Amino acid sequence: MQRKLCLFTLGGLIALFSTSVFAAEAPLDLTRTSVGIFAVIVFVVAYLLVMGEEYLHLRKSKPVLVAAGIIWVAIGWTYINHDIPGLTEEAFRHNLLEYAELLLFLLVAMTYINAMEERGLFDALRVWMVRKGFSYQSLFWLTGWLAFFISPVADNLTTALLMCAVVIKVGEGDKRFINLCCINIVVAANAGGAFSPFGDITTLMVWQAGIIKFNEFFILFIPAVLNYLVPAIVMSFYIEKRRPAAVYENTVLKRGAFRIVLLFLLTVATAVACHSLLNLPPVLGMMTGLGYLQFFGYYLRQTLPSSLARKRVMAEKRGDEEALKRLGSVVPFDVFSRVARAEWDTLLFFYGVVMCVGGLGFMGYLALVSEVLYGGWDAVYANIALGVVSAVVDNIPVMFAVLTMEPEMSHGNWLLITLTAGVGGSLLSVGSAAGVALMGQARGMYTFFGHLKWTPVIFLGYVVSILAHLWLNADSFKVFG
């Protein structure tokens, strides 16, 4: 019952309208009609444009936003002609509600990450690694492990960009080294995000759906480690054993940096408590946490003049002209400027995907795919195949499609699709947001074909992680939701 209350899917909608109360207005099967085929073509064209983002320089949100509008207009027009307009409105609202919950959740998380970045936390981490003058091999492992352990708390995109900045800074233009490090970072960030509800949008979707509890994700830790470790060990043998020149750079943590980290942890705890203890959506806890940050921002602004005066006196006593100059350019902390810096292209892309897939599901295509995959195949093989598909098609629509199909699967299989959809994107550079972003950041050094060369090794890690989950968590395959 809890699962049904938490997850508003088209599968649930179709089931609702198939009851005797609304038996006269059942959704139409449009899978074999010209309207349905047209909708599929629109979605495929939009996704081809998304996949060509690197070459077209067209933001990925644009084609799916237009495609979502076209698909739902086609649905509305069809239902108007059949004189049953009410079903389309309800279906659209259910999909919109599901998106709204995830949007607000992600918006708060991104705001906190942006606040930490503005306070200088990530710059301080980068400068520390650069100053240490690690060898190339040490830097390869350090950036990989940091990406793996930061991405469960932050998101894999932000984590990958941070680590890539370090690699480019000390890589001295060595294309081979930078390419290997970027591949390692992408694999690590995606693997690290797979065992945490906050590490990736797909894990967040599964948790918010009420299918897997917060603590149950952590049994994927060892499979996720193996997914990262197997290809990393192989690639490490191809890293030169030399030490780059140390680069010195100064950075100063701004006031309240560590307190914002504590507030973020408190926000996460609030979201978990709302969901686990009160059976309320996690977004309630996250929005409450945004209130924490707003109050703290108010405190920082109110106490800024006295803080600057105190620091200015200390700098004058030391004769620190650089510090005095820096204090003269301090800008008050503003929460809403952090909200504005959220990754809106990703959030709008997510809207387009949810509405496109929701529209195709309402037409009957997801039920058809579910029958083919989960009716004709064993769920384990279906979930492994979908993980490979996520290397080409973004894992967000893959996971949303599975949630909408709502196949009858054990907990072990739900964890398996969470794992495979999360790490399957590492097989290609275009298979995850982290990979696409790094191709832009390390343009000319980290490339599609440079990543493709190591796909067999990454696939080996993919297989090992699946086998580890099937073996270590065998008992979870006996438990059904």
Image (spheres, rainbow, N blue to C red):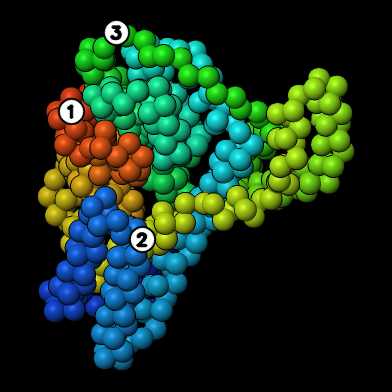
* Kind of residue at badge 2: Ser
Residue that mark 3 sits on: 241
Residue positioned 35% across, 18% down in the render: 140
Q: Is residue 414 visible?
A: no
Q: Is residue 299 above or below residue 347?
A: above
Identify the residue at horizontal 16%, vertical 50% (top origin). 373
Residue 289 in view in this figure: yes
Residue nearest the observer in this picture, 213 or 410: 213
Q: Nearer the viewer, residue 241 or 157?
A: 241
Q: Callout 2: few (<14), some (14-19), or many (20+) C-alpha neighbours within 10 Å?
A: many
Look at the picture and state if 277 lies above or below 1. Answer: above
The mark found on residue 446 in the picture is none
9 sits to left or right of 115: left
In the rendered structure, are the residues bearing label 1 and label 3 in contact, judged by CB atoms less than 8 Å apart? no
- Count of marks, rendered view: 3
Q: CA distance from mark 1 to mark 3?
A: 20 Å
Q: Residue at x 83, y 46 (%)?
A: 302
Q: Earlier in the sequence, mark 2 or mark 3?
A: 2
Please give the name of the residue rendered at 76% of the width and 24% of the height, measured from the top-left corner.
320
Q: Vertical placement of 435 versus 218: above or below?
A: below
Q: How far apart in space, not on screen, are marks 1 and 2 (Cα)?
A: 29 Å
The answer to which image quadrant residue 139 occupies is top left
* Earlier sequence position, callout 1 versus callout 3: 3
Q: Which residue is mark 1?
A: 454
**Label 3 crowd (10 A; few <14 / some 14-19 / many >=20):** few
Camera-nearest residue between 439 and 270: 439
In the picture of the structure, the residue carrying the numbered disc 2 is 61
Label 1 or label 3, whichever lies nearer to me, is 3
Near mark 1 (Cα within 10 A), the count class, few <14, some 14-19 or many ≥20, is some
Q: Disc 3 residue type? A: Lys
Q: Secondary structure at mark 1?
A: loop
Foreground tag (2 vs 3): 3
